[in-house]
Amino acid sequence: MSLYRDTGVVLRVHKLGEADRIITLLTRRHGKVRAVAKGVRRTTSRFGARLEPFGHVDVQFYTGRSLDVITQVQTVDAFALPLVADYQRYMAASAITETADRLAAEEGEPALKLYLLVTGALRALAAGERDASLVLDAFFLRAMSFAGWAPAIAECARCGDPGPHAAFHVQAGGSLCVRCRAAGSVHLAPEVLVLLEALLNGEWTVAERSVQGTRRDASGLVAAHLQWHLERQLRSLPFVERRAHEWRPREEPVSGK
């Protein structure tokens, strides 16, 4: 019998038979792993609740012929508890795990940077200290950088001429200078480029000073760029609420109550 352990985030689950589930995890050392959790849909299961989406867990696997089998589970971070209690953060987390599942296409291929990006984004969402929309867009930009698809923001995507440049073209790879501007390019306000660069580089003080319209424009570009490279639409993304003006940290009391 071959056993191994790893820490991972549960990306998705599928029913198998009457009582089992197939669990897809993004792990620290083994990349994406699909494994069977036997009996977890029974009420008497010892660790069924720990293998829900967004769970950050320490797992022991038994190497099977086609799918590995989960034999032990311990919770590392209970991200799911605060996420399922808030619709906006839940949908943002769903978009994050769906993206990670698409980017980690090959099972068993190490993807440490992506794993750290996912756990960092889920931790920020669970803490509730930042706007969920900003956290999601920051994750998208950094995940695209991991995949080699990062949009050009500070320079022209074609000639490399330093920016900022007002034109942006998804298919061309990002910002375009006047000489390289292609048909179908959109015109960006300077504030949108500032926000994109701040999210990519983790400059949260700059990002959180942005206004709703700037965030909405940046989110549209980031989503279009990601989905063009994925060659498909993210199922969860249309349900993500982009309402920056209504966001408040969890610990901050709402005025008038």
Image: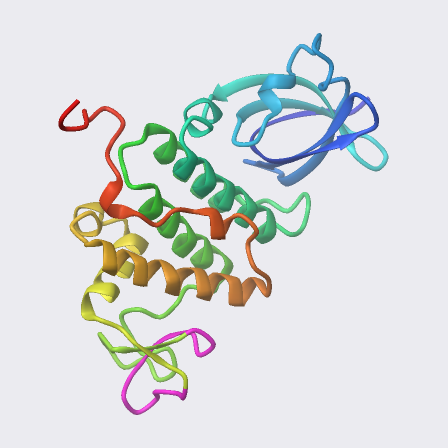
Frontmost residue, 126 versus 60:
126
- The residue closer to the viewer here, 191 or 111, is 191
The secondary structure making up most of the magenta span is loop
| Residue 123 location, quadrant | top left
**Quadrant where the image shows the C terminus:** top left
Tell me which residue sits at (71%, 18%) in the image: 40
Q: Residue at x 83, y 27 (%)?
A: 17
Question: What color scheme is it?
Answer: rainbow
- Across and down, in percent, residue 192 comes to 25, 64
Decide which of 141, 188 is in the foreground and name it: 188
* Quadrant position of residue 126: top left
Q: Magenta includes 176?
A: yes
In this rendering, position of residue 36 left or right of residue 90: right
**Residue 49 relative to residue 146: left or right:** right
Highlighted magenta segment, given as a residue range: 170-183
Looking at the picture, tell me which residue is in the foreground, 26 or 44: 44
The extreme right residue here reads: 65
Q: Residue at x 31, y 63 (%)?
A: 217
| Residue at position x 55%, y 24% in the image | 57
